[in-house]
Image: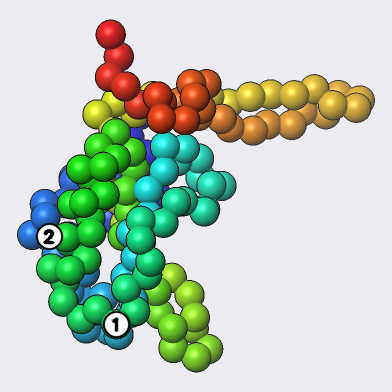
């Protein structure tokens, strides 16, 4: 199952050149870029681990791409995304976020049903990957 979160998630994987063009666009808008990673891509897991600090003063896409490549080298079986934050007063929010790395194997999610008082049903999702300990979640299947 392919995780579809963020901008461009329904498109084929972006090349490094295409990633660089998107970063360049964000920087031209005056947005600050940052790199984040996780091994738990649950849709409600909005707080991924930060790779370094946000790059508020950086104006060159090559610098952000260098951080993406360093994160890929250190965390090859993790989801990695680039964020572009607009610090303009009245916005102060993420304007762009897209995945730039995925594990080789994406096991997906399961729907869990709970019976609660009366005949009510509650539903939730959990990642198959979260059944394994952090750091071992995305080893290729045997």
Tell whether 138 sits left or right of 21.
right
**Which of the pair 55/28 is nearer the observer?**
55
Residue picked out by circle 2: 18
Q: Which of marks 2 and 1 is nearer the N terminus?
A: 2
| Image position of 117 with respect to 52: above or below | above
Name the residue located 35 percent from the left edge and 26 percent from the top edge. Answer: 138
Residue 96 at least partly seen: no
Q: Position of residue 54 (x, y in %)?
A: 37, 70
For label 2, the crowd category at 10 Å Cα-Cα, with few meaning under 14, some 14 to 19 and many 20 or more, is: few
Q: Residue furthest right?
A: 118
What SS does tag 2 mark? helix
Tell whether 16 sits left or right of 3.
left
Q: Position of residue 31 (x, y in %)?
A: 33, 79
The quadrant holding residue 32 is bottom left
What SS does tag 1 mark? loop
Gap between marks 2 and 1, in whole Å?
Answer: 22 Å
Name the residue located 41 percent from the left edge and 30 percent from the top edge. Answer: 135
Residue 23 at least partly seen: yes
The quadrant the N terminus occupies is top left
Residues at circles 2 and 1 in contact by the CB criterion of under 8 Å:
no
Q: Position of residue 86 (x, y in %)?
A: 40, 80
């Amino acid at each position: 199952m392919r995780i579809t979160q963020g901008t461009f998630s329904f498109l084929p994987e972006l090349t490094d050149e295409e990633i660089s063009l998107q970063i360049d666009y964000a920087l031209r808008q005056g947005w600050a870029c940052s790199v984040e990673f996780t091994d738990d891509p649950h849709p409600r897991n909005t707080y991924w681990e930060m790779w370094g600090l946000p790059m508020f003063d950086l104006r060159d896409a090559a610098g952000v791409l260098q951080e993406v490549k360093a994160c890929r080298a250190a965390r090859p079986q993790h989801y990695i995304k680039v964020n572009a934050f607009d610090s303009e007063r009245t916005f102060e929010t993420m304007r762009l976020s897209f995945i730039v790395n995925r594990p080789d194997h994406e096991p997906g999610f399961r729907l869990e049903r709970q019976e609660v008082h009366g005949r009510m049903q509650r539903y939730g999702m959990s990642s198959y990957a979260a059944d394994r300990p952090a750091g071992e979640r995305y080893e290729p299947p045997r």
